[in-house]
Image (cartoon, rainbow, N blue to C red):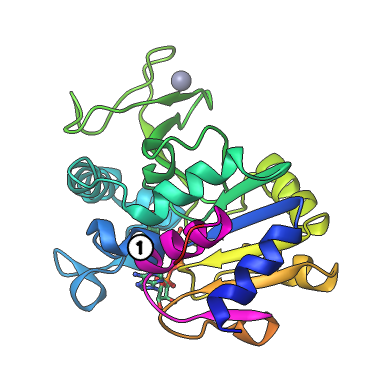
Amino acid sequence: MNELDRASELLRRARRVVAFTGAGVSAESGVPTFRGAGGLWEGRPVEELATPQGFAADPVRVWRFYEQRRCNLARCRPNAAHDVLARWQDRFAAYTLVTQNVDGLHEEAGARHVLHVHGSIWTVRCTRCGRERHEPAAPLPEVPPHCPACGAMERPGVVWFGEMLPEAVLDAASQAAAHADAMVVVGTSAVVYPAAGLVQIAASAGAAVIEVNPEASALAHLADVELRGPAGELLPRLDALLAGAPA
Ligand SMILES: NC(=O)c1ccc[n+]([C@@H]2O[C@H](COP(=O)([O-])OP(=O)(O)OC[C@H]3O[C@@H](n4cnc5c(N)ncnc54)[C@H](O)[C@@H]3O)[C@@H](O)[C@H]2O)c1
Ligand SMILES: [Zn+2]
């Protein structure tokens, strides 16, 4: 039996399924990587921009960086991997889609309920009153944006290096992982914690782990099945097998 057949067998038997995605699921949509060319943006290391310290030092510079990313993302479309992961919400008895991505492409593909463990680039949050709002405009009407309630500067609704993950979201994701029959890990290098810990939670609770990635991730040793290749090709083939059609 080949790896795709094995993966589809495991998923056929599963009632509770978690999909856990990282930047790789958006690679075929042309999403620029976080670090870009050489890890620099306008001569600055990205770590200086995506941190609370970087924002405190120069919020306008950080906002210009995010504005550029938002405008780039606004031109990106979901790919076949996003489509399959959205369709699976109607395939399994219980299905949880957990993503480390901030790009919103899962929702754009039709996913109704996505757990964003690292926040969303389409959300902004007030630095004074904490009010959060959805802000889909790219370009933004003003850079940086200001809170409609209190007038203070807002910040991007993403989780920066050194920040806590949103507790309720991480709890929900951990619960889903702990009760999963199968977890499909797509396009993540699995080196960023605590998010990568979700794979360990699922594996130690006995879930079948299926990794979809052209390269072995740091947690590939936990995988029961390793599907080596681009998610945009392999997930549609896996989905076709599940639906009973030849891959
Ligand atoms: N799209 C986004 O929102 C975005 C983009 C870049 C980084 N980030 C953030 O940066 C952090 C990086 O961690 P990460 O693990 O998500 O990404 P990562 O960059 O560390 O790893 C990407 C993984 O995707 C794999 N990959 C590349 N092309 C692929 C394809 N076509 N199909 C399947 N897999 C493919 C790579 O082999 C690699 O293992 C995350 O916290 C994430 O929030 C988000
Ligand atoms: Zn406010």
Q: Residue at x 38, y 40 (%)?
A: 109
Instruction: Provide residue 116's location: percent of width, then percent of height.
Output: 54, 45
- Identify the element where label 1 is drawn: helix
Q: Position of residue 182 (x, y in %)?
A: 72, 62
Image x and y of residue 152, in percent: 38, 23
Give the quadrant of residue 14: bottom right
Say whether residue 128 is visible. yes
Task: Magenta stretch: give its range.
Answer: 224-244
Locate residue 145, reporting x and y percent: 28, 28
> Is residue 226 located in the magenta-colored stretch of the structure?
yes
Q: Residue at x 39, y 42 (%)?
A: 104
45 or 112: nearer the viewer: 112
Q: Quadrant of residue 23?
A: bottom left
Q: Is residue 133 above or below residue 139?
A: above
Q: Is residue 72 shown left or right of residue 203?
A: left
Q: Is 93 left, or right, of 4 in this rendering? A: right
